[in-house]
Image: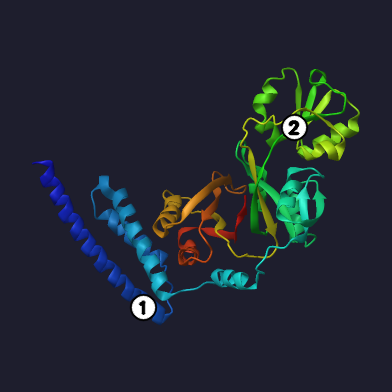
Amino acid sequence: MRIEDLRQQIDQTDAELLRLFQERMEISAKIAAWKKENGVPVLDKARERKKLQAVADAVPGELRDDARLFMSTLMGLSRSCQHRLNGESSLLSEEIGKAISDTPELFPREAAVACQGVEGANSQLATSRLFRNANILYFSSFEAVFSAIEKGLCRYGILPLENSTAGSVNSVYDLMMKHDFKIVRSVRLKVDHYLLALPGTKLSDIREIRSHEQAISQCSEFLKSLPGVRIVPCENTAAAAKYVAESGRHDVASLSSRACIEEYGLSCLKASVQDSSGNYTRFICISKDLEIYPGADRTSLMATLVHEPGSLYQLLSRLYVLGINLIKLESRPLPDRSFEFMFYFDLDIPVYQPEFRQLILELPSVTESFTYLGSYSEVI
């Protein structure tokens, strides 16, 4: 048989599948009307499990998994259609709508802001990008910043989330699972690292370099060029500069920001020693309450999924069907569940689009649990 004949058979089969698909969706619409009239929720997990098992039992063994995937996708489309036709809402969608209407039109210029580190830290520089006059309270750890927000000590907190060279700040992602907060804005800060030491120090004098582990990672190539120099991680790049200034030692230097030169009276032994000239760190601005400012075009979520094959696919397929661009996917191990993970998603979608509302309605059916972290815009 010629390939053209086989393709013609495929086309005929596809046409029949499309006719049956349209018929199925029309029936689904009638079911949606019945469920709305009788106060029955769209999702019936027991019915879906039974249906998928029946489908798997009805086809040859080598096609069982494919048939389950095919039917699961059909049922997902049916659920989406029913949610849309019923115009359903949820407590979360109502909370988001209220936040949109209650949040002021302009992001505040002044606020009490929690930062990890000391003056001259990159978190402080990111804060200055977001706020004209910030009352900055410095804390010793990222967890203390989260706690300051939860306790109402500060209205906002600034935390580093990822770097274009060194990757994600895993400790912050892990803390996200422990604390209650919302993301209200993010900022991308170009990070240049300077090798700083006491005035009069020469590069050949240096036997120890201190900095935050992320900065050390971002300057790995430069550090390899200094054999025999001891590398000491510390809590913050600015704290490293402060240590150098107060130590009185001419054999120690720090990898810190340019702002630390004047702040701590240090000299620059070498400028811009990071591996990449395009070295950026993304910071998030968090708050206790949900605030959604005009122009919010990015949404962040955390979700745990059922520990079974295809659970992540089910969620990603909904994003595909709704035309939502996934711009970041991060996974972190759940501390109390062996080899299971929390997934963090950044989605490129304005909070005002109907597809966003549709996703919020559908998330309970494709996740074990999820947390909406906020919708916001990013300052570049």
Query: What residue sits right under mark 1 in the picture?
Result: 33
Q: Residue furthest bottom?
A: 37
The image quarter in which residue 279 lies: top right
SS class of the residue under badge 2?
strand
Element at label 1: helix
User: Quadrant of residue 229 in the image?
Assistant: top right
Q: Residue at x 39, y 82 (%)?
A: 37
**Residue 178 percent coordinates (x, y):** 67, 54
The residue drawn where x is 80% and y is 49% is: 139
Asked whether residue 233 appears in the rendered view, the answer is: no
Badge 1, how many Cα within 10 Å: few under 14, some, many 20+? some
Residue 158 visible somewhere in the drawing: yes
Q: Position of residue 366 (x, y in %)?
A: 46, 59
Give above or below for 163 relative to 271. below
Q: Which residue is mark 2?
A: 194
Side (left or right) of 146 relative to 311: right
- In the image, residue 165 lies at what x, y percent? 61, 36
Could you say which disc has been placed on residue 5 in the image?
none
